């Protein structure tokens, strides 16, 4: 009988331990006590429901306590819904507290939307209070006189919370500022005018409303540095002159080739005509129109002509050799 009683006692203790363990597993008693101490109403059933919905209670209760102490009006359902949507509850609450302290009108729905859009809502609020300076790389622009200028600007921006969801980022701001610098320098008659008054660039670019459609508001654009680069105009003129020279040389070579072809054609005609001479002479001899003595006289004349041409060519060659020696 005593053994049966002992077994029952052991079973009862095991059941009690199991029930107590299960209770404390589903009911984070420490968080419940902390919420009561902070005057935040979170029922035990809410904590159990969070466990059943696979929500970590501390990710909800602790930010709720922090928000309540900061004077914000947020309920458990809002925080839990944002957590289940994949948002960062703690960062959203920190952003709301920072906005409340800085007197910035930011509601929970807007902060949650910004966080779910993938942007850092806390960093956005901080940038609204403390504007950020973005420095552009060297922007190459060419004035009308052909001189290249390398311009570097500093853009002071702050976050526009109303346009943060769906608004363009810093890369768009830099691209638009670079485009404005290129346009302004390109419309200047001389690079000296830009060097004399660089503020004209910032004023012109700032008046174009470059922050439209972006998540930022441009406060100022300051020209940090202007350097003189290459003479692009002279370089282009040099390239054009070189191209014109190549075209002229090509046309001259074409004309020379045509002249050579024409000369060869004429020589072929002469050779063809000379090849007909013996045949014509033979025909004249047969018909008696040319005597034998006339034929010998003509041969002597041809030989004399060849001799004179040979002497002339020899003298010309000697003259060229003498000229080359004198030049050397």
Image (spheres, helix red, strand yellow):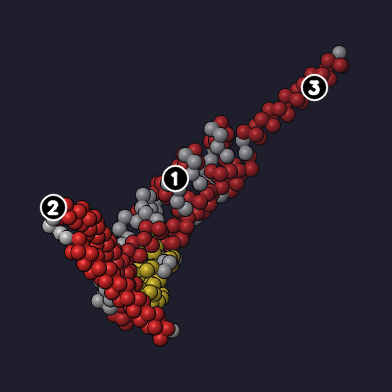
In depth, the one of 161 and 216 nearer the eye is 216
Residue topped by disc 1: 116
Based on the displayed image, in which of its 4 quarters is residue 7 positioned? top right
Q: Is residue 300 left or right of residue 171?
A: left
Q: Earlier in the sequence, mark 3 or mark 2?
A: 3
From the image, state whether disc 3 or disc 2 is nearer to you. Answer: 2
Find numbered disc 3 in the image and state the secondary structure of the residue it sits on.
helix
Q: Earlier in the sequence, mark 1 or mark 2?
A: 1
Residue at image position (35%, 81%) is 319
Instruction: Kindly give the residue lying farthest to the right in the view shown.
Output: 2
Quarter of the picture holding the N terminus:
top right
Q: Which mark is residue 9?
A: 3
Residue topped by disc 2: 287
Q: Answer yes or no: do the residues labelled 1 and 2 have beta carbons within 8 Å?
A: no
On screen, 190 above or below 82?
Answer: below
Residues under labels 3 and 2: Cα distance? 161 Å
In depth, the one of 16 and 135 nearer the eye is 135
Find numbered disc 1 in the image and state the secondary structure of the residue it sits on.
helix
Residue at image position (25%, 68%) is 300
Residue at image position (47%, 39%) is 85
Residue at image position (61%, 35%) is 27
Q: Position of residue 102 (x, y in %)?
A: 43, 62
Residues under labels 1 and 3: Cα distance? 54 Å
Q: Mark 3 Cα within 10 Å, few/some/many (few <14, many 20+)? A: few
């Amino acid at each position: 009988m005593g053994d049966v009683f002992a077994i029952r006692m052991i079973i009862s203790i095991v059941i009690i331990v199991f029930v107590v363990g299960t209770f404390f597993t589903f009911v984070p008693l420490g968080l419940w006590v902390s919420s009561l101490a902070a005057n935040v109403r979170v029922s035990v059933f809410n904590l159990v429901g969070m466990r059943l919905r696979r929500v970590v209670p501390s990710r909800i209760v602790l930010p709720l306590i922090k928000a309540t102490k900061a004077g914000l009006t947020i309920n458990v359902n809002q925080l839990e819904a944002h957590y289940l949507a994949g948002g960062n509850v703690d960062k959203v609450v920190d952003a709301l507290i920072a906005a409340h302290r800085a007197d910035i009108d930011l509601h929970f729905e807007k902060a949650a939307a910004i966080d779910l859009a993938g942007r850092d809502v806390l960093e956005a609020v901080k940038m609204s209070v403390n504007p950020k300076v973005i420095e552009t790389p060297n922007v190459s622009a060419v004035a009308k006189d052909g001189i290249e200028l390398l311009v570097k600007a500093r853009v002071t921006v702050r976050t526009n919370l109303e346009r943060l969801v769906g608004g363009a980022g810093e890369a768009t701001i830099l691209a638009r500022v670079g485009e404005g610098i290129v346009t302004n320098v390109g419309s200047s008659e001389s690079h000296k005018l830009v060097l004399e008054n660089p503020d004209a660039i910032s004023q012109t670019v700032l008046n174009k409303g470059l922050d439209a459609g972006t998540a930022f508001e441009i406060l100022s654009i300051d020209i940090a540095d202007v350097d003189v680069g290459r003479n692009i105009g002279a370089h282009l003129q040099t390239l054009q002159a070189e191209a014109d020279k190549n075209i002229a040389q090509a046309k001259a070579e074409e004309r020379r080739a045509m002249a050579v072809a024409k000369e060869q054609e004429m020589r072929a005609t002469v050779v063809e005509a000379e090849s007909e001479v013996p045949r014509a002479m033979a025909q004249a001899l047969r018909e008696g129109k040319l005597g034998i003595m006339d034929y010998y006289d003509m041969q002597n004349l041809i030989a004399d002509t060849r001799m004179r041409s040979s002497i002339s060519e020899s003298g010309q060659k000697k003259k060229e050799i003498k000229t080359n020696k004198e030049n050397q």
